[in-house]
Image (cartoon, rainbow, N blue to C red):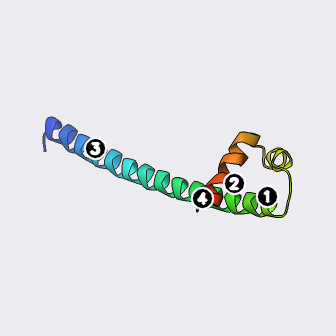
């Protein structure tokens, strides 16, 4: 194998490694997104429970570190469903 062939072969290997790395990164992103959705689902369940137990929206917002408007939106979504 001459020098150019070795260089080309090395470049092809590098490109394949990059491709595999990108695939792994994409899979990790999908996993993170799925986890986020799970957490938000659980958070919504907790917020709904707090609201249904009679806790004021402002207090819920303070506990979960979200704006009261966001909590109102979450509660309204649940009422519609």
Q: Pointer 1: residues within 10 angstroms few (<14), some, or many (20+)?
A: some
Q: CA distance from mark 4 to mark 1?
A: 15 Å
- Tell me the tag on residue 39: none
Residue sitting at x 68%, y 58%? 44
Q: CA distance from mark 1 to mark 2?
A: 8 Å
- Tell me the tag on residue 80: 4
Q: Is residue 30 left or right of residue 3?
A: right
Q: Are marks 1 and 2 in contact (CB under 8 Å)?
A: yes
- Judged from the image, the secondary structure of the residue bearing numbered disc 2 is helix
Q: Position of residue 10 (x, y in %)?
A: 25, 43
Q: Is residue 13 left or right of residue 66?
A: left
Camera-side residue: 26 or 50? 50
Q: What residue occupies the far top of the structure in this picture?
A: 4
User: Of the residues tagged 3 and 4, which is closer to the observer?
Assistant: 4
Q: Are marks 3 and 2 in contact (CB under 8 Å)?
A: no
* Residue assigned mark 3: 15
Q: Position of residue 23 (x, y in %)?
A: 37, 52
- Judged from the image, the secondary structure of the residue bearing numbered disc 1 is helix
User: Of the residues tagged 1 and 3, which is closer to the observer?
Assistant: 1
Q: CA distance from mark 3 to mark 2?
A: 49 Å
Placement of 55 over or under 70, stated as above or below: below
Camera-side residue: 54 or 27? 54
Placement of 12 over or under 33, stated as above or below: above
User: Of the residues tagged 2 and 4, which is closer to the observer?
Assistant: 4
* Residue assigned mark 1: 51
- Judged from the image, the secondary structure of the residue bearing numbered disc 3 is helix
Q: CA distance from mark 1 to mark 3?
A: 53 Å
Q: Pointer 2: residues within 10 angstroms few (<14), some, or many (20+)?
A: some
* Residue assigned mark 2: 75
């Amino acid at each position: 194998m001459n020098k150019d062939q070795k260089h080309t072969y090395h470049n092809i290997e590098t490109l394949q490694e990059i491709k595999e790395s990108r695939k792994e990164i994409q899979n990790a992103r999908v996993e993170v997104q799925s986890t986020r959705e799970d957490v938000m689902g659980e958070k919504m369940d907790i917020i709904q429970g707090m609201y249904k137990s009679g806790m004021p929206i402002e207090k819920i917002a303070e506990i979960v570190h979200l704006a009261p408007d966001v909590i109102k939106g979450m509660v309204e979504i649940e009422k519609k469903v």
